[in-house]
Image (cartoon, rainbow, N blue to C red):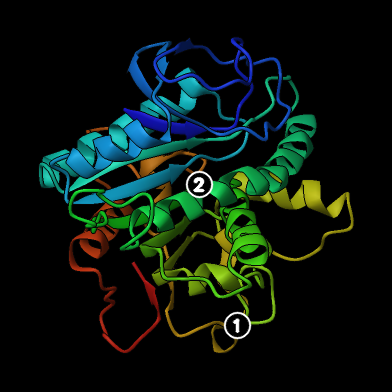
């Protein structure tokens, strides 16, 4: 499995293609360096470097790429890689060779205590935007004819479609990465890098996608933006309480969907998952995978259909807000 990370490494910050690496889990400082890596097996990782990493994706039989950005208080071997592997397995069972899942790992805190973890992770999510903004530009160069990342013999860029699935506080990482990419690299003229952007149980204020808010650039970078939310998401209830202690009173995007669909761009869709989220996860938060019997959940089926078709459909094709 391929992954990209800005976590601190025990081997130090100087990149070297081919070196064995390991995570320094007790260090949750946000690294300016970004490492393009491969997981060979549990706790066995190799740094590939961006060139070899992107060449692997170009040579892969997979038709599309899905970037998976995990949520808060998640660590690599206990949480992140198992979920990414399950996501890959679900796609492969539906259609082998359609998707390659690539994990994006940012530095969650390894301390005990939910509230302390929450605020440390929120700061790390914001700061990670500077690191991963460079990754976005790297992917854009990779897909652009005539760039230094295109094939030097044929000048053919990689034409594989890229999707992104951000879960929980991973949505904060995504929002800040795109915003900072636009600010520092694109003069706010953001290209459509992603085919589909899936915002699952997003731990963001529910106005963030409005045209005048900081999340509006997510829409600029995507063909479709699909927000999956559930009002009985217990993890986001705890998030709301934590934010209230710091005078942030707005409801969460993952609880209600966008505050006002009239104020978001036309490529944003809002999907109510109340009927399905607790079938997958008792807390109703991590509901984009499979159920206890190993069957794909309704949210995963919806994600698969959007990846396969590149379009979002409710009961009414012209409707942008619907119940799953």
- Between 130 and 317, the residue placed more toward the observer is 130
* Residue bearing the label numbered 1: 260
Against 105, is 258 above or below? below
Residue sitting at 67 percent across and 73 percent down? Answer: 207
Residue 170: image tag: none
Residue drawn 42% across the image and 79% down it: 267
Q: CA distance from mark 2 to mark 1?
A: 31 Å
Which sits in the foreground, 222 or 182?
A: 182
Can residue 199 be seen? yes
Rendered image quadrant of residue 73: top right
Quadrant housing the C terminus = bottom left
Badge 2: few (under 14), some or many (20 or more) residues near its Cα, within 10 Å?
some
Residue 263 percent location from the top left of the image? 60, 86
Left or right of residue 281, residue 34 in this image: right
Residue 213 against residue 242 in the figure, above or below: below
How many labels, in total? Answer: 2
Numbered disc 2: secondary structure: helix
Quarter occupied by residue 75 = top right
From the viewer's side, name the closer residue of 33 and 290. 33
Image x and y of residue 11, in percent:
59, 10
Which mark is drawn over residue 135? 2
How many C-alpha atoms fall within 10 Å of the one at disc 1: few (<14), some, or many (≥20)?
A: few
For image coordinates 64% across by 49% down, the residue present is 129
Which circle's residue, 2 or 1, is located before the other in the chain?
2
Q: Is residue 50 left or right of residue 314?
A: right
Q: Secondary structure at mark 1?
A: loop
- Please determine whether, in this image, residue 145 is positioned above or below residue 281: below
On the image, the x and y values in percent for residue 79 come to 47, 26
Q: Is residue 295 visible?
A: no
The quadrant of the rendering that contains the N terminus is top left
Residue 318 % position (x, y): 31, 89
């Amino acid at each position: 499995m391929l992954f990209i990370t800005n976590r601190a490494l025990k081997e130090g910050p100087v990149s070297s293609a081919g070196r064995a690496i390991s995570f320094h889990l007790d260090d949750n400082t946000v690294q300016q360096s970004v490492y393009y890596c491969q997981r060979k097996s549990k706790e066995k990782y190799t740094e590939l470097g961006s060139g070899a990493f992107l060449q692997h994706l170009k040579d892969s039989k997979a038709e599309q790429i899905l970037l998976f950005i995990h949520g808060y208080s998640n660590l690599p071997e206990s949480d992140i890689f198992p979920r990414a592997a399950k996501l890959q397995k679900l796609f492969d069972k539906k259609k082998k060779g359609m998707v390659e899942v690539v994990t994006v790992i940012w530095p969650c805190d390894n301390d005990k205590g939910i509230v302390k973890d929450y605020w440390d992770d929120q700061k790390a999510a914001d700061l990670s935007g500077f690191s991963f903004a460079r990754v976005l530009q790297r992917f854009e160069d990779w897909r652009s004819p005539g760039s230094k990342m295109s094939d030097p013999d044929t000048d053919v860029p990689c034409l594989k479609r890229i999707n992104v699935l951000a879960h929980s506080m991973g949505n904060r990482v995504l929002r800040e990465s795109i915003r900072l990419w636009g600010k520092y690299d694109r003069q706010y003229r953001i290209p459509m890098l992603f085919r589909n952007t899936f915002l699952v149980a997003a731990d963001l204020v529910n106005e963030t996608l409005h045209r005048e808010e900081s999340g509006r650039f997510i829409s600029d970078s995507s063909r479709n933006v699909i927000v999956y939310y559930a009002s009985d998401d217990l993890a986001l209830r705890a998030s709301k309480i934590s934010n209230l202690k710091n005078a942030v009173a707005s409801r969460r995007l993952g609880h209600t969907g966008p505050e006002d669909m009239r104020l978001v761009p036309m490529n944003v869709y809002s999907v109510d998952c109340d009927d399905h989220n607790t079938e997958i996860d008792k807390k109703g938060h991590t509901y984009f995978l499979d159920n206890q019997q190993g069957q794909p959940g309704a949210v995963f089926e919806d994600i698969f259909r959007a990846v396969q078709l590149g379009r979002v459909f409710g009961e009414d094709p012209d409707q942008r807000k619907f119940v799953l």
